[in-house]
Image (cartoon, grey):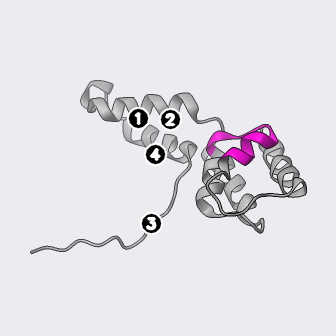
Amino acid sequence: MIVKTVLEEEGLTLSEVKEIFTELTTPRSEEEFTYEFRRALDHVNTFAKLTASQSRQLVNELKSLEKMKGEIAIRIADILPLSKDEVRSIYAKERFSLTEAELDEILDIIARFY
C-alpha cells in the first residue's frame, strides 16, 4: 500500500492562482482543458483584482496585525472589503470581535493596495 502525506500546505490568493493558471494555459488552446478547469480559470479572471505580488504583499502586511490569521488575511486580500461591516462579516466566525481602531487599521492597509 502506498501512503501519501501532505508535506507542506500554503494558502494562495485568487491573484496567485490566476498567475499559475496563466502559466499553465499559455502554450495550449482552451479546448484541451476540462470543463472544471475552464470554469476555475473564468472565476479567477473575473474576481482577481490585484496582481499576485500585490496580493502576497497585502497578505504579509495583514499578517503582521495582532488578531490576523493567515486564512483571514488571504480572504481579505481576495475580497478587498471597503467598509467596516464587510470586514466584520469576514470575522463573523471568530470568537473575538475587532475594535474600531483595528478595523480602521485593516481598512487603511487595504486602501494602500486598492
Q: Amino acid at mark 2?
A: Val
CB-based contact (under 8 Å), mark 4 and mark 3: no
Q: Which residue is mark 2?
A: 44
Q: Which residues are magenta?
A: 78-89
Question: At 38% across and 29% down in the image, what residue appears?
Answer: 39
Q: How many marks?
A: 4
Task: Answer whether labels 4 and 1 touch (C-beta < 8 Å).
Answer: no
Could you tell me which residue is drawn at 50 percent across and 35 percent down?
Answer: 44
Q: Is the residue under label 3 in contact with that under label 1 (CB below 8 Å)? A: no
Secondary structure at numbered mark 1: helix
User: Which numbered mark, 4 or 1, is in the foreground of this view?
Assistant: 1
3D distance between C-alphas at marks 4 and 2: 11 Å
Helix, strand or loop status at disc 3? loop
Which residue is denoted by mark 4 in the rendering? 20
Q: Residue furthest left?
A: 1
Disc marking residue 9: 3
Magenta stretch: includes residue 27 = no
Viewer-proximal residue, 32 or 94? 94
